[in-house]
Each structure stands twice: as C-alpha cells, then as structure tokens.
Image (spheres, rainbow, N blue to C red):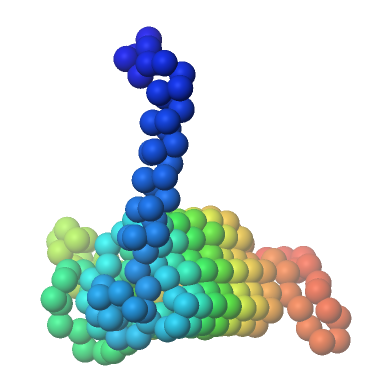
Amino acid sequence: MTWVRRLPRSTRTLLGQAMRWGRSAAVDLGTIGPGDEAGKRFGYLGPGAALLWPQGSIYNEHCLSVGAGTLIGPNVCLTAGMAPGQEMVTSPVVSIGERCIIGRGSHIIGHWSITLGDDIQTGPYVYITDQNHVYTDPVEPIGRQWPVEAAVSIGSGSWLGANVVVLPGTTIGEHCVVAAGAVVRGHVPDRCVIAGVPAKIVRKWSEDEGWTSVDHEVPLA
C-alpha cells in the first residue's frame, strides 16, 4: 500500500479535488487564443480559434494560419519547417480553414504548402506532411538524401479517421471520409470514402445513383 492510500479518506478526497481543479485551471490558462501573446505570433489566428493545452511543438507561427472557430486539440504538433527560426520560402506554409477540429496528438508538418478547407475534422494521431525523403541512392543513408516537397490540399467538409497518414502531393476532395489507419497519396475525388494501405476508393456518390459501393477498390490517381 502506498503512502497515499494510508491517508484519511477525507484528505484524499480533498487532494483529488485540488488536482482536478489544477488540471482544469491549467487547461484554461494554457490554451492559446487570438488575444494571447502566443496567439499574436501566428500569421493569422481567427476569432474563436483555440489551441488547447498542452500544445505539441509549434514554431514559425508567422507562417501558420488558423481560421475562426477552429479547435486544435491537445498535444498537436503544428509547424512550418523543421526548426524554430527556419527561413521559409512560402507563407502561409500551413493554412487551416474555419470551424475545423484537429484531433489530439496529430501532426501537421508543413514545408511548402498544406491547405485544409473549412469544417474539416480529424480523429487523433493524424499525420499530414508535404515533405518526404527520396530513395534514389541505394548506398547513401536515406536520412541524408535531400527531401522533396509537394503541396497537400484537403477539401472542406471532410473527415479523417484516427491514425490517417496523408503524404506529399495528395489532394483530397470535398466531403470525403478517410477511414482510420489509411495511408493516402494521390488525388481523391469529391464525396467518396477511401480506406486501406495504400488508400483506395471503396464508396462514392453521384447525383444519378447516390451512394454506391465500389465492387473493385479503385486506386487513387
């Protein structure tokens, strides 16, 4: 039995209440909004937007744009480049639209251009990047081979499930669902469901037929 359990029940109750109050206070005090000094470092942080405490790695905020009413969950990493103070050639590098919800523990790591539309939601631990290492030299360590960038775009109204990975050069259309755990690279049309590794179209919508399942999973373009 730990020393905590040897305390009187009334004392443990009071200490527990104090800890929960402290956590709630930390969330309120640590959240970043547009009126905070930390929020003013952003290229744009719209009215009602918030980055919940505790934040993950956030740097080069002047190249980040977050729309009004967007909620960035705890432990989300939101960066332009790989290190604070890195000189960027585009701005904004990462642009997130209005009324989005980015799930806890997600990473949005931009180097060139990542654009999220309005009303996008993600589950936890989603990874979105516009840069990847190349593997052109079989002798040189891959980590030393110069990475390449390709812009990423995700259309308004889309939903990305937990643990989705979005790779450089991906374009996801409007009102799409990306199933949990999918790895996405390529062009995703509007109003469809994709799943798998690599992700493929499994369901789509058209004005003539409404929602239809895809008999043979269609690879992304």
Near-viewer residue (176 or 208)? 176
Residue 77 in view (yes/no) = yes
Q: Is residue 153 visible?
A: no
Q: Residue furthest bottom?
A: 90
**Residue 23's x, y, as percent?**
39, 47
Q: Determine the residue positioned at 45% across, 57% down.
A: 104
In this view, the residue farthest toward the right is 209
- The reply, left or right, for residue 196 in relation to residue 148 is right
Q: Residue at (52%, 69%) from the top-left corner?
A: 101
Front one among 194 and 70: 70
Q: Quadrant of residue 45?
A: bottom left
- Residue extending farthest top: 1
- On the image, the x and y values in percent for residue 74 come to 40, 57
State left or right for residue 18 relative to residue 119: left
Quadrant assignment, res 80: bottom left
**Quadrant showing the C terminus:** bottom right
- Which residue is pictured at 38% across the width and 53% down the height? 25
Nearer-the-camera pick, 18 or 141? 18
Q: Nearer the viewer, residue 188 or 178?
A: 178
Residue positioned 44% across, 76% down in the render: 49
Q: Is residue 14 left or right of residue 154?
A: left
Picture layout, residue 14 above or below residue 48: above
